[in-house]
Image (cartoon, rainbow, N blue to C red):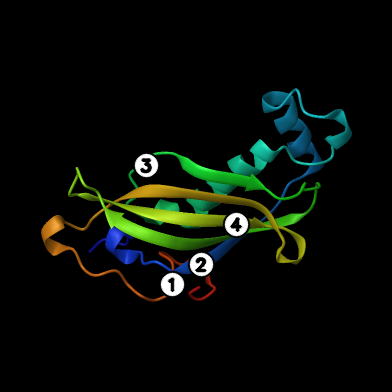
Amino acid sequence: MSDLAFFEDFAAGQAFAFGSHALSAGSIAGYRAAYDPAADKAAETTASPWQLCSLLMRMNYEGWMIRTAARGAPGVDEIRWHRPVAAGEVLGVRVRVLDTRLSNSRPELGFVRFEHVVEGAGGTPVLTQTNSVMMARRGPEAARPPRTTAAAPGPAHEPVGET
């Protein structure tokens, strides 16, 4: 039996939270120098918005995706940056399943659409992102109805209930 979470393990409304990461002044400066050299000099002590996207990708992978049968993503539907993030601010991530659907062309896959919220001090959103992830199915013939619990796959999460 696999410990991976498959398409059938996700249901609309399912939510989970994970992560605790603080960007250092050095990591902000290093990222800006390497990937965002045209950034506003007045904002040198705040993270590049693109650094927040990179951090979300890393936190998602380590927080839950590593324990799924994810098969990639067709892209990002929407990204919004809500406010700057200063060095030392502790960030966490909340994820909610918006909907699921089977692939029309590949019966071994389904799509799970997620809303990701990177939260800063006091739980205030600093970034939101919506995108779909392709997930392998357990098998087209053995597909089970989605779970209705709020638990995320794997042990490295904190359930936050259904929304």
How far is mark 3 from mark 1, CA to CA? 22 Å
| Residue found 81% across the figure and 47% down from its top | 86
Q: Which residue is mark 4?
A: 117
User: Residue 18: x, y in percent?
Assistant: 57, 62
- Amino acid type, mark 4: Val
Disc with the residue nearer the chain's start (4 vs 1): 4
Disc with the residue nearer the chain's start (1 vs 2): 2
- Residue 28 as seen in the image, left or right of residue 53: right
When asked about the image quadrant of residue 124, the answer is bottom right
Q: Which mark is residue 130?
A: none
Disc with the residue nearer the chain's start (2 vs 4): 2
- Amino acid type, mark 3: Gly
Q: Which mark is residue 72?
A: 3
Can you tell which of label 2 and label 4 is closer to the viewer? 4
- Amino acid type, mark 1: Ala
Say few, some or many: other residues with alpha carbon within 10 Å of mark 2 (under 14 / 14 to 19 / 20 or more).
Answer: many
The relative height of residue 29 versus residue 99 in the rendered view (above or below) is: above
Disc with the residue nearer the chain's start (3 vs 2): 2
Q: Which residue is mark 2?
A: 16
| Residue found 44% across the figure and 61% down from its top | 98
The relative height of residue 87 versus residue 161 in the rendered view (above or below) is: above
Foreground: 49 or 158? 49
User: Residue 28: x, y in percent?
Assistant: 76, 37
How far is mark 1 from mark 2, CA to CA? 7 Å
- Residue 157 as seen in the image, left or right of residue 29: left
How far is mark 4 from mark 1, CA to CA? 17 Å
User: Residue 138: x, y in percent?
Assistant: 21, 58
Q: Which residue is mark 1?
A: 151
Disc with the residue nearer the chain's start (3 vs 1): 3
